Image (cartoon, grey):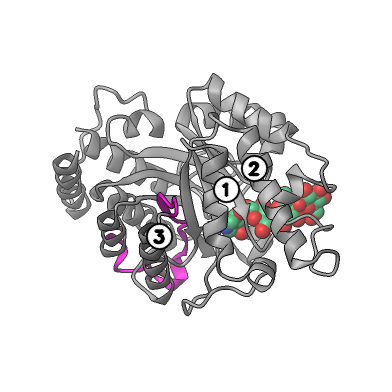
């Protein structure tokens, strides 16, 4: 696999430099999923459950194009436990069933986070001891519910600031930094086979934040804490340029013995799109995929939505959008072709 991945990189570099990538791949039915087969890297998407229920072409595309799925929102704490002790797994179960029907693996997202927690979960309402009990109960309930059906979990999400200090959250304030190790231990007890990830944004290249993760992973593993994966969300923007040290970063985590994954890739731009932005976007998607294909233990590459019809970006960044590989009509952009060709070359 390793040599295959290096050959892929060389081939892709040649293709980018101007030679013609071959179109006819024996396993190529035109989908990303087919192109990714045999590369050792799974191709995934975040799934919007309202769209999956209401939009048949969207649903068909999720099944056709991807071999892993991540719930964009429906496994988050506010959704699964709307009232204390009252669980609602409906939407998450629907996704897990959909995935099983379509031969896809599920990335669970996410167990401990500062955002999208239930409104009843506040520091005013509970003591630190009670919060610890609630976090433990949440992790056992959720991971236990999906035991054997979720391949990998984003256990702890976005725990560091950009400067590498721990983010000031309800969990850090109430429980101290040990909450991260506890969360991993509890998740592992609840499903010993699930692959357990840390996950964050702006941690794709070597920088203060990824340095902090590197130190944390090293420390936790030395202490026997079951951290098995390092997730890089990959929310990029063409207006910022792209980090130049992604491969270096992924490889240093490789050497620590953890799996890596790109977990939420999208490449936004200031609207309207033009040819230069669209080309830069394709390069951003390709850059992260090439790093994944070249790393020994990079197991998956997930896009955070595959069509602009349902992307989170315009709602969060004024005047920005067009961040996914397919447009609002599910028509491919150059980014889609880059992903497919990069996978195809790696699969040879
Ligand atoms: O479900 C309610 C709906 O009932 C209500 O009518 C509507 C009105 O605003 O809000 C709906 O909730 C929204 C939810 O998405 C589901 O659509 C929230 O307002 C909205 O804030 C929420 O946004 C999500 C965001 O996480 C929250 O932080 C995005 O869809 C989701 O793509 C985004 O995903 C995160 C990852 O989990 C972690 N990494 C960053 C990434 C992008 O922010």
Q: Which residue is mark 2?
A: 140
Residue sitting nearer the eye, 71 or 347: 71
Q: Secondary structure at mark 1?
A: helix
Mark earlier in primary sequence (3, 1):
1
Does the stretch in magenta take in 246?
A: yes
The residue singled out by tag 3 in the image is 223
| Nearest the eye: 7 or 146 | 146
Q: Residue at x 54, y 42 (%)?
A: 189
Q: Which mark is residue 8?
A: none
Q: CA distance from mark 2 to mark 1?
A: 7 Å
Q: Picture coordinates of residue 66 (x, y %)?
A: 46, 33
Label 1 crowding class (10 Å Cα cut-off): few <14, some 14-19, many 20+?
many
Q: Determine whether label 2 and label 1 are within 8 Å by CB.
A: yes
Nearest to the eye among marks 3 and 2: give it: 3
For label 1, the residue is: 186
Which callout, 3 or 2, points at the residue further toward the start of the chain? 2
Task: State the residue in front, 21 or 76.
Answer: 76
Write down the region rendered in magenta. 225-247
- Say whether marks 3 and 1 touch (CB < 8 Å): no
């Amino acid at each position: 696999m390793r040599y295959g991945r290096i050959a892929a990189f060389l081939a892709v570099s040649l293709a980018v430099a101007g030679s013609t990538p071959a179109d006819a791949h024996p396993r190529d039915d035109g989908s990303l999923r087919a192109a990714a087969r045999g590369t050792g890297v799974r191709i995934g998407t975040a799934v919007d459950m309202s769209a999956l229920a209401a939009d048949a072409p969207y649903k068909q595309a999720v099944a056709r194009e991807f071999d892993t799925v991540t719930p964009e929102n429906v496994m988050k704490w506010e959704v699964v436990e709307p009232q204390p002790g009252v669980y609602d797994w409906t939407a998450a179960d629907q996704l897990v069933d959909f995935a099983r029907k379509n031969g896809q693996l599920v990335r669970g997202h996410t167990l401990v986070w500062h955002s999208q927690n239930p409104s009843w979960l506040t520091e005013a309402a509970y003591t630190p001891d009670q919060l610890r009990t609630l976090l433990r109960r949440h992790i056992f309930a959720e991971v236990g519910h999906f035991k054997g059906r979720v391949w990998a979990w984003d256990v702890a999400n976005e725990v560091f600031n950009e400067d590498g200090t721990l983010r000031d959250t309800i969990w850090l304030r109430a429980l101290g930094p040990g909450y991260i190790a506890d969360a991993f231990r509890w998740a592992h007890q609840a499903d010993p086979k699930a692959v357990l990830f840390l996950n964050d944004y702006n941690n794709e290249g070597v920088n203060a934040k990824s340095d902090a993760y590197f130190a944390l992973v090293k420390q936790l593993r030395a202490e026997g804490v079951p951290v098995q994966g390092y997730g890089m969300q990959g929310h990029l923007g063409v207006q910022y340029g792209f980090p130049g040290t992604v491969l270096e970063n992924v490889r240093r985590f490789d050497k620590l013995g953890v799996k890596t994954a790109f977990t939420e890739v999208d490449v936004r731009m200031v609207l309207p799109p033009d040819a230069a932005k669209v080309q830069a976007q394709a390069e951003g998607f390709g850059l992260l995929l090439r790093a994944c294909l070249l790393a020994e233990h990079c197991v998956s590459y997930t896009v955070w939505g595959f069509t602009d019809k349902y992307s989170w970006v315009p709602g969060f960044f004024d005047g920005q959008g067009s961040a996914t590989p397919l447009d609002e009509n599910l028509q491919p952009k150059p980014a889609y072709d880059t992903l497919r060709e990069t996978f195809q070359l790696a699969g040879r």
